[in-house]
Amino acid sequence: MSTKILQINQVSKHFVLGTSEIPVLKDVSFEIEEGSTVSIVGPSGSGKTTLLGLCAGLDQPSEGTITLNGIQLTGLNEDQLAAVRNEHVGFVFQNFQLLPTLTALENVLVPLELRGLKPNERDALALLQRVGLGHRADHYPSQLSGGEQQRVSIARAFANKPKILFADEPTGNLDAETSQSIEEMLFELNRESGTTLIIVTHDLDLAAKTQQIIPIKGGKIA
């Protein structure tokens, strides 16, 4: 029997600007199976990154409910949301978001430290080797290319063995050749770990590689 790892029920989101309310998402509902690969696609300004932030517990919806791995996120405070993210969620961002003062190895260890776990350098180094960067473990982000930084970011995302991994335009800042190798690595690691993968992208070729596509247009599922 399949398990729903993410349930989005009639979610809307608006932002207040002065005396105006700006709607970004309107009455969005969908479910995602555990272990599946999913893409959220849409043009710039369609609300897909806002939706990812809500799904991952980075923000709260204005209306509706979000349940991640059996935990209802709606109504949790910031500390509770952070605890859920640390325990269940991994992230890969378009701009890598590595800490510049930490080496590649230290960056991979960050999720474990956030969870209060004892850093396991052997496992972190194995992840770096898995993404082809074992020999760059002591290098800082400024000493790495964009593709190498994204590989470190992917290794970091899998470090705490997340139940669900969110990737926001993971190849958006990379050239075509590098993008392809990063995509292959992301899907391969995901298969090996059994993680649920959700990718926000405007790249329809990348979206076609996932099992489920959720198209967003004008804040609604198209």
Image (cartoon, grey):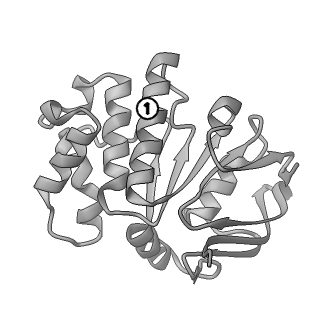
Q: Is residue 204 left or right of residue 34?
A: right
Depicted 113 relative to depicted 116: above or below: above
Q: Is residue 100 left or right of residue 218?
A: left
Q: Quadrant of residue 30?
A: bottom right
Of residues 171 and 101, the one nearer the viewer is 171
Residue type of the residue flagged with mark 1: Ile
**Residue 75 appears in the picture as rendered:** yes
**Residue at the image position 15 percent from the left and 37 percent from the top:** 137
In this view, the residue farthest toward the front is 1
Q: Is residue 168 left or right of residue 155?
A: right
Image location (x, y in percent) of residue 8: 72, 69
Q: Quadrant of the N terminus?
A: bottom right
**Residue at the image position 57 percent from the left and 37 percent from the top:** 169
Image location (x, y in percent) of residue 25: 80, 57
Depicted 97 relative to depicted 16: above or below: above
Q: Quadrant of residue 153?
A: top left
Of residues 43 and 58, the one nearer the viewer is 43
- Residue picked out by circle 1: 182
Of residues 34 and 48, the one nearer the viewer is 34
- Number of disc labels: 1
**Residue 95 appears in the picture as rendered:** no
**Residue at the image position 49 percent from the left and 26 percent from the top:** 180
Disc 1 crowd rating (10 Å Cα; few below 14, some 14-19, many 20+) is many
Q: Is residue 222 left or right of residue 115?
A: right
Assign a secondary structure to mark 1: helix
Image location (x, y in percent) of residue 21: 84, 58
Image location (x, y in percent) of residue 219: 83, 51
Depicted 100 relative to depicted 119: above or below: above
Depicted 25 relative to depicted 96: above or below: below
**Residue at the image position 46 percent from the left and 74 percent from the top:** 84
